[in-house]
Image: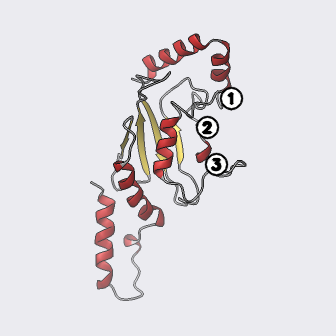
Amino acid sequence: MLTLASKLKKDDGGKTGRASGASDSSHRVSIRDRLLTKEVAELEANLPSTCKASFPDEDKLHHFQLAVSPDEGYYQSGRFQFEIDVPEAYNMVPPKVRCLTRIWHPNITENGEICLSLLREHSIDGTGWAPTRTLKDVVWGLNSLFTDLLNFDDPLNIDAAEHHLRDKEDFRNKVQDYIKHYAR
């Protein structure tokens, strides 16, 4: 399935045929792409049952979408789409993630910005991005935003958090209304 993996194998096999010192930029594969080949295979083998990753272009593993369909809690029955772009400087910097589905959530704005500590490049509490983290950590973190990492105490969407504090039942109704209109 991973065409980049087969391309890497083919490129590695063809190195012996080139004269030493010869350089062909069309055959160079970035460190990011080499890491992603391994990480995507691991990710596909270990996706949570509530998640599905899709790669619009299998030669571009650095750009993909993730669908999260929570099976419990406020967001049960919704399908939320995330866009994940992995920058060239990966794994020294975190992937860029945006929620494509409009949602009423304390840690995701209606514009798609996400508050998830492991996506922060610099973090005071030490829970931010580190080169030892992988795409699997990102996917599991996004999945957890709908269950155990749902955080009303340190919100990005203050209106949603305050709404929950004021009236939990009305909050639940607004979440379901958003799911009905945007997350099916």
Residue under numbered circle 2? 115
Look at 38% across and 47% down and name the residue there. Answer: 46
Q: Name the front one of labels 2 and 3.
A: 3
Residue 157 can be seen in this image: yes
Where is residue 30? Give x, y as percent. Answer: 45, 66
Q: Amino acid at mark 1?
A: Asp
Observer-nearest residue: 148 or 105?
A: 148
Other residues around mark 1 within 10 Å, as few (<14) / some (14–19) / many (≥20): few
CB within 8 Å, label 3 to label 1: no
Q: Is residue 87 above or below residue 75?
A: below
Other residues around mark 2 within 10 Å, as few (<14) / some (14–19) / many (≥20): some
Q: Quadrant of residue 130?
A: bottom right
64 vs 105, left or right, is left
Q: Quadrant of residue 151?
A: top right
- Residue 127 numbered tag: 3
Whichever of callouts 2 and 1 sits on the residue coming sooner in the sequence is: 2
Q: Residue furthest bottom?
A: 20
Where is residue 33? Give x, y as percent. Answer: 43, 62
Look at 31% across and 84% down and name the residue there. Answer: 16
Colouring chosen for the image of the structure: secondary structure
Look at 58% across and 15% down and name the residue there. Answer: 171
Q: Amino acid at mark 2?
A: Cys
Q: Amino acid at mark 3?
A: Thr
Q: Is residue 158 above or below residue 13?
A: above
Residue under numbered circle 1? 153
